[in-house]
């Protein structure tokens, strides 16, 4: 089992920045990759960014390329999502997820999920 706890969400004005954190605990040695997803009201959940734990290979959705950066700290078992130039359309609940099997970062599937953290961007 892997437990994931997100933090760092909040309210920010358009153009501002936030950094989300996801702390992993439990059987983290088996983690292959981690991703950040988001779900806005009335919309499907979408993958925003993902990273392989070992090599640091990354994936970004087109909508966030150049604005968001995913990174990981192996010593702290934590993955981050730095979000810059935020837009109102980035408003959503952001979820952290972990995969313990070799997967395509974009396709998954991801095995463990956090509870989510709300990000609200005002115009």
Image (tube, rainbow, N blue to C red):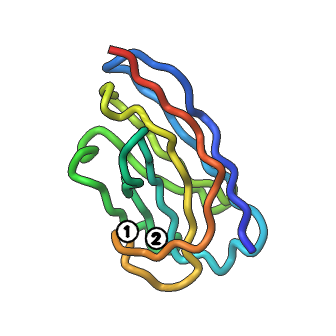
Query: Real-space Cα distance between discs 2 and 1?
Result: 5 Å
Quick one: which residue is furthest to the front in this view?
A: 42
Q: Is residue 96 left or right of residue 105?
A: right
Quick one: which residue is furthest to the bottom in this view?
A: 102
> In terms of image quadrants, where is residue 87?
top left
What percent of the width, then of the height, locates residue 33?
Answer: 50, 71
> In terms of image quadrants, where is residue 78?
bottom right
Q: Is residue 56 above or below residue 30?
A: above
Secondary-structure class at tag 2:
strand
Q: Is residue 46 above or below residue 120?
A: below
In this view, the residue in front, 18 or 106, is 106
Q: Residue at x 50, y 44 (%)?
A: 94
> In terms of image quadrants, where is residue 122?
top left
Q: Which mark is residue 52?
A: 2
In this view, the residue in front, 67 or 116, is 116
Q: Residue at x 73, y 62 (%)?
A: 3
Circles 2 and 1, Cβ within 8 Å, touching? The answer is yes
| Quarter occupied by the C terminus | top left
Q: Residues within 10 Å of mark 1 (few under 14, many from 20)?
A: few
Q: Is residue 109 above or below residue 5?
A: below
Q: Which mark is residue 32?
A: none
Q: Is residue 86 left or right of residue 66?
A: right
Secondary-structure class at tag 1:
loop
Q: Is residue 65 left or right of residue 41?
A: left
Quick one: which residue is furthest to the left in this view?
A: 62
| Circle 1 residue | 57
Q: Residue at x 45, y 19 (%)?
A: 12
Q: Residue at x 55, y 25 (%)?
A: 10
Say which label, 2 or 1, has the lower sequence index.
Answer: 2
| Quarter occupied by the N terminus | bottom right
What percent of the width, then of the height, locates residue 57?
Answer: 37, 68
């Amino acid at each position: 089992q892997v437990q994931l706890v997100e933090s760092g969400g909040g309210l920010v004005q358009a153009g501002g920045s936030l950094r989300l954190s996801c702390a992993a605990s439990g059987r983290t040695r088996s983690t292959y990759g981690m991703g950040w997803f988001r779900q806005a009201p009335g919309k499907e959940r979408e993958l925003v960014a993902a990273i392989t734990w070992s090599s640091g290979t990354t994936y970004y959705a087109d909508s966030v390329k150049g604005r968001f950066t995913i990174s990981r700290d192996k010593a702290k078992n934590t993955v981050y999502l730095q979000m810059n130039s935020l837009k109102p359309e980035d408003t959503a609940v952001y979820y952290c997820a972990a995969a313990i099997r070799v997967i395509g970062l974009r396709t998954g599937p991801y095995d463990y999920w956090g509870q989510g953290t709300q990000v609200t961007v005002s115009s």
